[in-house]
Amino acid sequence: MTPWTLELPDPDATRRLGRALGQALRPGLVVALEGDLGAGKTALAKAAIAAAGGVDEDDVVSPTFIIAAEYPGAPEVLHVDAYRLESPGAFVDLGFGALEEGPRAVLIEWADRIAAALPGDRLTVRLAHADPARRATLEAGGPASAAALEAVRAVV
Ligand SMILES: Nc1ncnc2c1ncn2[C@@H]1O[C@H](COP(=O)(O)OP(=O)(O)OP(=O)(O)O)[C@@H](O)[C@H]1O
Ligand SMILES: [Mg+2]
């Protein structure tokens, strides 16, 4: 499926994309957040988790050290940071099971590190530095993520 690229001129633009993503979350949707250190993965995830309705943005913490956190919302969201995971197997060992079967939506920072443990039908969001701004490229890997991508495009 064709990737979609958009410019994020400032942190507010990242937040807007995050909110749109949060509204498009569904149980079992897996969102792979990729991009270098400081690219904006956590900023995007915070806005998305808050938009899913369960918490304020300020209550979402970076999962770099805790690896995974669950948030209430509609749907509930599992927020993972794979930076410190050594392999896809290390993620499987955490016991979250088949992510695409729900009951939560899943946002994964540094998802490229554990790609082999993720379903093919996932929405990949690549964030790149375009100093001082950012650029986002969204790509769907199957029907569920394609529907989410369409929903995001409709509101950003
Ligand atoms: N579109 C943007 N333009 C400029 N700065 C931005 C933009 N989006 C986010 N930022 C800023 O980038 C910084 C780093 O963001 P963030 O912590 O979310 O990155 P990250 O990808 O999660 O990094 P890490 O891999 O280290 O966890 C924040 O200060 C954030 O405000
Ligand atoms: Mg981060």
Image (tube, grey):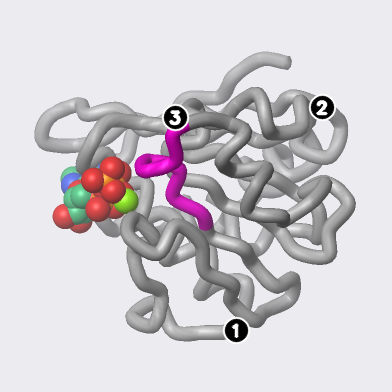
Q: Is residue 52 left or right of residue 143?
A: left
Question: Tag 3: residue type?
Answer: Arg
User: Mark 1 and 3 residues: CB-CB less than 8 Å, in contact?
Assistant: no
Label 3: state its secondary structure: strand
State which quadrant residue 141 falls in: top right
- The boundaries of the magenta stretch are 80-86
Question: Tag 2: residue type?
Answer: Gly
Residue 81 in the magenta stretch? The answer is yes
Can residue 52 be seen here? The reply is yes
User: Mark 1 and 2 residues: CB-CB less than 8 Å, in contact?
Assistant: no
Residue 87 in the magenta stretch? The answer is no
Seen from this angle, which residue lies furthest top? 2
Cα distance between the residues tagged 1 and 3: 25 Å
Q: Is residue 37 left or right of residue 70?
A: left
User: Mark 3 and 2 residues: CB-CB less than 8 Å, in contact?
Assistant: no
Q: Position of residue 135 (x, y in %)?
A: 33, 30
Q: Nearer the viewer, residue 128 or 8?
A: 128
